[in-house]
Amino acid sequence: MDEFELIERYFRPLSRRDDGTELGIGDDCAIIHARENVQLIVTTDTHVEGVHFPLTADPTQVGYRACATSLSDIVAMGGAARWASLALTLPTVNAQWLAGFAQGTKIALDLNKTSLIGGDTTQGPLTITWNIIGEVPSGCAMRRDGARCGDDIYVTGTLGSAAAAVEFAILTKVACNDAEQALLRRYWEPEPQFAFGQALRMLATSCVDISDGLLADLGHITRASNCGAIVELTRLPITESLIDVAGIDRARLLAAAGGDDYELCFTLPSECEMKLKQAVLNYGVAVTRVGRIVSGAADVRLIDEAGTRVSLGDNGYRHFR
């Protein structure tokens, strides 16, 4: 099977025809129609075998997670994901692997009816690169530079479970108990909250998705907004499954700095709290207030119940050290 047969069999079916695409897969470039009064938001993410997922990972899970985590960036800006292109480097053409990967990819793209409009295939170490194009009403994108002193800091969902799946080598275990299975699901099945992210556009002053760890990603907000932040360790939302596997103390530290959650961290003026509660009811998304924005240096302080600073040494994932 050559690259053109591969594209026709596994990836052309992921292209839609009702999404503003004039020309999709099959030419040198795609042609898309951007609507009036919207801005395009664009993100690119690369996923490498052995770095972002294990060598023996299920291809359906790999396809879903690689795409869903890339879509998460669009959610963090309050956008709708419209189009995607995929650069896929494969060591060999394995029909079974490709069928599973395409199935997982389709599930992720269907979360927001996103269309695959092009990409590239080549031979080499397994590497997946997504380029996602989204839309947001002009001037309404949530950014990292809008946080203000006095804003409350919120996170969606729960934190730390995906990081625990990595730390405790659950990803490569042959058999897992119920608690470990729950952590595995959090790693492999992140759920970008498109509708809730769009609802936040009129409320949040800043937003970021949590990929490298809460403290590290909140640090992007404080640096862009020229402010500081205080995060309360005991407020961080964690699951019973995480506590069962890691213990309460380690669970809290993983929630603070573990990464791979792909939840949202956003800031909100206190006067918008009631509107936030209504949005939570409307969209069925759990949110937790975990801290506040403060004046001063662009520093994120993690404190315990007594108000004493907790030092972690390393506040999040970095590709290069």
Image: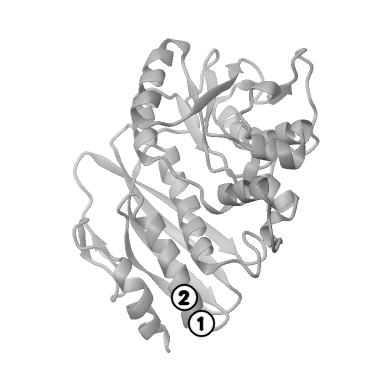
Quarter of the image with the N terminus in it: bottom left
Residue at the top extreme of this rendering: 271
The kind of residue tagged 2 is: Leu
Q: Is residue 289 left or right of residue 142?
A: right
Write the residue at 62% across / 61% down.
53
Residue 141 visible in rendering: no
> Callout 1: few (<14), some (14-19), or many (20+) C-alpha neighbours within 10 Å?
few
The kind of residue tagged 1 is: Asn
> Callout 2: few (<14), some (14-19), or many (20+) C-alpha neighbours within 10 Å?
some
Write the residue at 34% across / 55% down.
110
Q: Which residue is mark 2?
A: 98
Residue toward you, 269 or 274: 274
**Residue 94: image tag:** 1
* Image quarter of residue 47: bottom right
Write the residue at 30% across / 70% down.
13
Q: Position of residue 5 (x, y in %)?
A: 36, 85
Q: Position of residue 250 (x, y in %)?
A: 77, 36
The alpha-carbon separation of the residues under discs 1 and 2 comes to 6 Å
Asked if disc 1 and disc 2 are in contact, CB closer than 8 Å, the reply is yes
Q: Is residue 30 left or right of residue 164?
A: left
* Image quarter of residue 290: top right
Number of marks in the rendered image: 2
Q: Position of residue 163 (x, y in %)?
A: 67, 46
Of helix, strand and loop, which one carries label 2? helix
Of helix, strand and loop, which one carries label 1? loop
Residue at the bottom extreme of this rendering: 1
